[in-house]
Amino acid sequence: MEFRKYAARFRLPFYLVCDFESFLTPIDHNEDVDPIKATILIDEHNECGFACHRVSEYSQYQTDPFVYSGPGVMDKFYEHVMQESRTIPTTRTWTH
């Protein structure tokens, strides 16, 4: 088997690969049951960390994974993504 449909590829010069870690925490069961869904929530996900890795076909723009675990995970994630948006070149200066 060989891949031949190169024109069908979704090519991006840069992208971020992110993975979140979370843990389940029991929630208060004093809430009413949703009559439409007929379900009772018993746990909720609480984020506790993430890793984010910039990937590019241009080796000079690839980075090691950024890993964070601690308070304010989502704030730190958004801060990191905004920093990435300022760091990634916005012009065609990154071409071969």
Image (tube, rainbow, N blue to C red):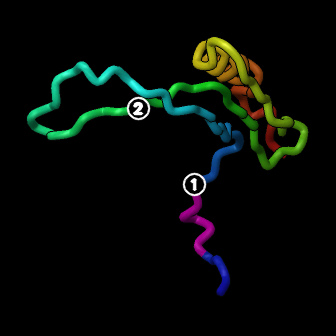
Instruction: Report which residue position mark 1 lands on.
Output: 10
Q: Is residue 86 above or below residue 55?
A: above
Rendered-image quadrant of the N terminus: bottom right
Mark 1 is on which residue type?
Phe
In the foreground, 80 or 61: 80
Left or right, 4 with reference to 58 = left
Residue in the picture at 90% in, 38% down = 60
Mark 2 is on which residue type?
Asp
Q: Which residues are magenta?
A: 5-10
Q: Is residue 62 above or below residue 5?
A: above
Residue in the picture at 58% in, 65% down = 7
Q: Is residue 83 above or below residue 8?
A: above
Indicate yes or no whether the magenta region holds residue 90: no
In the foreground, 7 or 75: 75
Distance between the alpha carbons at the discs numbered 1 and 2: 37 Å
* Numbered disc 1: secondary structure: loop
| Disc number lying in front (1 or 2) | 2
Instruction: Report which residue position mark 2 lands on.
Output: 43
In the foreground, 84 or 64: 64
Q: Quadrant of residue 64?
A: top right
Numbered-mark total? 2
Left or right, 55 with reference to 37 = right
